[in-house]
Each structure stands twice: as structure tokens, then as C-alpha cells.
Image (spheres, grey):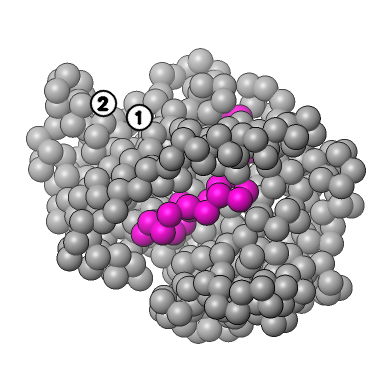
């Protein structure tokens, strides 16, 4: 086949999500209640999430049907195209075949609405009137605003204050889709007021914004909270990308040898790799599955596999995951979506078992790859996505050295149209290639040690 794009018709869309829980090579450690030390039950999560999502979080069913109402919204942009990167291949002069699955075609411009739409639906089905969430650069906030608008739910976003001030466009996108967006910390929550009292000029952080969104949901009867990555149900909703990809590769009469994606919390990566992991775990296929992260926040490649909190304020359940410690504040790299101290428990387990490989790369190399991609393929990637592209290019260059004709797939998680100021910085100066000092990991080892017993 020599098509530039492989499309599916709407009738060929996957009808069910793939739940990896029953196929994991070891049992997943349960989330722990930090107060009692016991596993968290559905009733503990009920103030924050609708039952439909809590059931998915704990489900052992391999396939979970996608409701028609969710499908009807996903069809605004799905199925997404699988592209063959012929021009990039020629530029690299590689014998490898390079493909990319394009999640930038969604209205908010990333993979995130694959789950925000599903989450809004399950909330609406249980009569929830309002959803709160946090956002850093605004990718998740805009994806949830979009979904809430289509299901007629109010949406309130706590946006990290520095980003609110520096990145007006995603905030305007949220407001366009009818959401309220507040610079966090606010005066509206106890958590916010406490921080402002101590430091009125605080730039805010994702950890603080999570605390505010959780507090507001917990205190209001008709309000729930929503998270854009890390949790099992979020990864589940993202598997639609990998399931589509499998059908597209059948049409292309090809099969991936290497799959590369970027990892923040791990949801886009899990989404397009988990359906292939099933083949790999069943021993049918040799596939290299590679997650790429920033050297400034190398959670999977250098973190500890330990119980830890999801947020800075220690309000969430404890999750067993790779983590750099919940007190860790990553350096201000341009890939804001990859600055998270932890990683999804399901993905962490697979890295611990040696089924998935993790690599960390510095941001100048990332932007070099982003430019090469934009100048050959035309599409301008988000800085997060550029990590996946760099990983794919490195593999293709290796193929040139060895002469191997591998099939390489890149997860194209989103476009960079709202990240052009990051490109501007790259054009005008050398970006700082932050490396994580070993002391930071040693420090985390110390304060996380008591949580390992959980
Ligand atoms: C949020 C985001 C990511 C990182 O989140 P994951 O949960 O790891 O997928 C990656 N790419 C883009 C474009 C994003 O918006």
C-alpha cells in the first residue's frame, strides 16, 4: 500500500473499549485510603465520581460497550486518520516505514476529548449538573469544557495562575465552550484561601488546583470532579485510538514493530498501545513499546515504584505507581502536559514488569524533531507530542544504520497551534536542558518510604 492516509468509515468504528485489567501480567495493587490504610471502595469515591465511572475503574470485564450517546459525539471527528510519513522517511533516508495516528483532529486539538466526552456522558446519565476540574496549560480544561457544553453540564475549571496569565488562548477556548475558568488559587475554596494567605503572589500549581477542584466537588451535592489522565477509566476511554489503529493497519496490510508515544500521566500512550499489548502478552508478536518523557520529569525511567499521593496537598487516595514524589515540582519545560510527578498505575505495572520501555529526552532534541516534522510532514506538533516524534525518528535513524525495514508508529497526541510561544523561545535561544538531580529522587525515597507499607 502506498496511501498517505488510511481512513476508517464511521461504521467501522470500534463499538467497545478494551479494558486491560484482566490481561495484566500481575494483579494491580489497589488504591489505598490514606486515613484508614485500607483499599478504597466505591463508596469512598462516590462523592467525586459518578457510579458508571467508578464501576469502570474497578471492572474486570475485558470489553466495555461504548454508549451510543458517546459515539454520536466522538463521530464529530472520529475515526481519526492513520498517516504514513513518506516525506519524513525520505528526509531521513531510512528503510523504516513511519506512521502516525493523528489525534490532533479533535475540536480541542488533542486526544483528551476521547475521555472528556465519555466522562461528561456518565455524569449526565446520573443527573450531575456541574463538573469541576483543574488544568495547567489548558488542554484538559478545554477538552472538558467542550464535552460539558455538548452534554449541557456546567463546567468550572481551576487553571494554574501563571498559565492563566501567560496562555490566554486556551482559556478563551474554554469560555467559548461555555465554561467558567478561574486562576488558581482562588478565594473560593479553603485550600485556595490558605495558600493565598501564606503567599498572596503564588504562581499556583497543578497540585493546588486539584485540591481546589476536589474540595468544591466534595462540598456540593450536584457537583462531581473529573480527571484527564492516570486513572483506569481514563486509559480505558483512550483505547479507541489503538483499536482503530489495529483496523487501519489491517487495511494497510502492515503491522507495527515499534510503537512510540509520549507519557505525561500515560493516557494517550496507554490508549494506542494497550490493544497491541494484548498481542504482545499473548506471545503472538514481537513489538517494542516505548514511552518517551522529558529528562526534567523522568517518572517512568528514573522514578520509584511506590505508593504515593496524586496531588501535592495529600487529599487523593494513594496509588501504586512510578513517581518522583508528590512534593516534586518539575522544571518549567514547554511540554506542560508532561510535568506530572506520577504515572498511571496500569502503565507503571507494565513498565515494572519489563513489558514497556521508558526513555527520557531533553527539550532541545525534542524541538529539533518537532521542526523536522513540521518541515517535512507539515503538521505542527504540540511540545508533548514532539517527544513521541523524537522517539520515532531515533528508531528510524537506527534502522538506517542496521538496514532493518521496521514499521514504526508514532502517537500524534495533539497539535501545537496554541504553543507557538514555545517555538518562539526555541527559535530565539537555546532552551535549558534540565536534568533531574539524583538528590531529588533520594529525598522522595525518604518521604515515600512510610507509604510503601500501605
Ligand atoms: C495532556 C497531553 C499529553 C499528556 O497526557 P497523557 O495523559 O500522558 O496522554 C500529551 N500530549 C498532549 C497533546 C496533551 O494534551
Q: Position of residue 320 (x, y in %)?
A: 68, 36
235 above or below 307? below
In the rendered view, does 133 fall on the left or right side of 30? left
Q: Residues within 10 Å of mark 1 (few under 14, many from 20)?
A: some
Q: Quadrant of the N terminus?
A: top left
How far apart in space, not on screen, are marks 2 and 1 (Cα)?
A: 7 Å
Instruction: Say whether residue 334 is magenta.
Output: yes
Q: Main secondary structure of the magenta part?
A: loop
**At x 39% / y 34%, what residue is drawn?**
359
Which structural element holds mark 1? strand
Q: Position of residue 69 (x, y in %)?
A: 65, 64
User: Is residue 44 or residue 242 the one in the foreground?
Assistant: 44
Q: Which residue is mark 2?
A: 406
Residue 324 visible to the viewer: yes
**At x 26% / y 26%, what residue is drawn?**
406
Could you tell which of marks 2 and 1 lies nearer the N-terminus?
1
Q: Position of residue 454 (x, y in %)?
A: 80, 34
User: Is residue 315 or residue 261 the one in the foreground?
Assistant: 315
Residue 194 quadrant: bottom right
Which structural element holds mark 2? loop
User: Is residue 404 or residue 161 the one in the foreground?
Assistant: 161
**At x 59% / y 57%, what residue is drawn?**
228
**At x 69% / y 82%, what residue is drawn?**
187
User: Is residue 410 or residue 442 the one in the foreground?
Assistant: 442
Region in magenta = 326-350
Residue 9 visible to the viewer: no
Instruction: Say whether residue 167 is magenta.
Output: no
Q: Which residue is mark 1?
A: 258
Whether pointer 2 and pointer 1 mark residues with C-beta atoms closer than 8 Å, the reply is yes
Q: Position of residue 75 (x, y in %)?
A: 50, 62
In the rendered view, does 157 fall on the left or right side of 452? left
Amino acid at each position: 500500500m502506498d496511501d498517505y492516509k488510511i481512513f476508517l468509515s464511521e461504521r467501522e468504528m470500534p463499538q467497545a473499549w478494551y479494558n486491560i485489567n484482566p490481561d495484566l501480567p500481575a494483579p494491580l495493587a489497589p488504591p489505598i485510603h490514606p486515613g484508614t490504610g485500607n483499599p478504597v471502595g466505591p463508596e469512598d469515591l462516590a462523592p467525586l465520581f459518578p457510579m458508571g465511572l467508578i464501576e469502570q475503574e474497578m471492572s474486570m470485564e475485558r470489553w466495555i460497550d461504548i454508549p451510543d450517546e458517546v459515539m454520536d459525539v466522538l463521530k464529530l471527528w472520529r475515526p481519526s486518520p492513520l498517516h504514513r510519513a513518506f516525506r519524513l522517511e525520505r528526509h531521513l533516508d531510512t528503510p523504516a516505514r513511519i506512521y502516525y495516528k493523528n489525534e490532533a483532529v479533535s475540536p480541542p486539538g488533542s486526544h483528551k476529548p476521547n475521555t472528556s466526552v465519555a466522562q461528561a456522558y456518565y455524569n449526565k446519565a446520573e443527573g450531575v449538573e456541574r463538573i469541576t476540574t483543574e488544568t495547567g496549560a489548558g488542554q484538559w480544561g478545554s477538552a472538558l469544557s467542550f464535552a460539558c457544553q455538548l452534554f449541557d453540564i456546567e463546567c468550572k475549571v481551576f487553571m494554574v495562575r501563571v498559565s492563566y496569565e501567560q496562555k490566554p488562548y486556551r482559556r478563551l477556548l474554554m469560555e467559548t465552550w461555555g465554561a467558567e475558568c478561574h486562576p488558581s488559587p482562588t478565594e473560593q475554596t479553603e485550600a485556595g484561601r490558605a495558600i493565598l494567605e501564606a503567599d498572596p503572589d503564588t504562581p499556583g500549581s497543578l497540585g493546588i488546583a486539584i485540591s481546589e477542584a476536589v474540595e468544591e466537588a466534595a462540598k456540593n451535592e450536584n457537583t462531581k470532579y473529573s480527571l484527564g489522565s492516570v486513572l483506569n477509566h481514563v486509559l480505558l476511554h483512550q483505547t479507541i485510538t489503538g483499536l482503530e489503529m489495529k483496523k487501519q493497519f489491517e487495511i494497510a496490510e502492515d503491522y507495527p514493530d515499534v510503537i512510540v508515544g509520549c507519557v505525561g500521566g500515560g493516557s494517550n500512550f496507554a490508549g494506542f498501545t494497550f490493544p497491541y499489548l494484548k498481542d504482545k502478552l499473548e506471545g503472538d508478536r514481537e513489538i517494542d513499546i516505548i514511552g518517551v518523557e522529558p529528562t526534567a520529569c523522568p517518572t517512568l525511567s528514573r522514578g520509584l515504584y511506590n505508593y504515593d499521593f496524586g496531588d501535592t496537598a495529600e487529599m487523593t487516595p494513594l496509588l501504586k505507581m512510578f513517581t518522583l514524589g508528590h512534593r516534586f515540582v518539575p522544571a518549567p519545560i514547554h511540554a506542560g502536559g508532561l510535568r506530572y510527578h506520577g504515572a498511571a498505575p496500569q502503565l507503571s505495572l507494565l513498565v515494572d514488569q519489563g513489558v514497556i520501555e521508558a526513555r527520557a529526552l531533553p527539550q532541545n532534541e525534542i524541538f529539533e524533531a518537532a521542526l523536522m516534522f513540521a518541515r517535512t510532514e507539515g503538521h505542527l506538533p504540540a511540545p508533548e507530542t514532539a517527544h513521541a516524534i523524537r522517539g520515532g525518528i531515533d528508531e528510524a535513524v537506527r534502522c538506517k544504520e542496521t538496514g532493518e525495514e521496521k514499521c514504526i508508529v508514532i502517537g500524534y497526541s495533539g497539535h501545537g497551534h496554541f504553543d507557538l510561544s514555545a517555538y518562539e523561545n526555541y527559535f530565539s535561544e537555546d532552551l535549558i536542558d534540565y536534568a533531574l538531580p539524583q538528590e531529588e529522587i533520594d529525598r522522595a525515597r525518604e518521604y515515600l518510604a512510610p507509604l510503601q507499607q500501605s
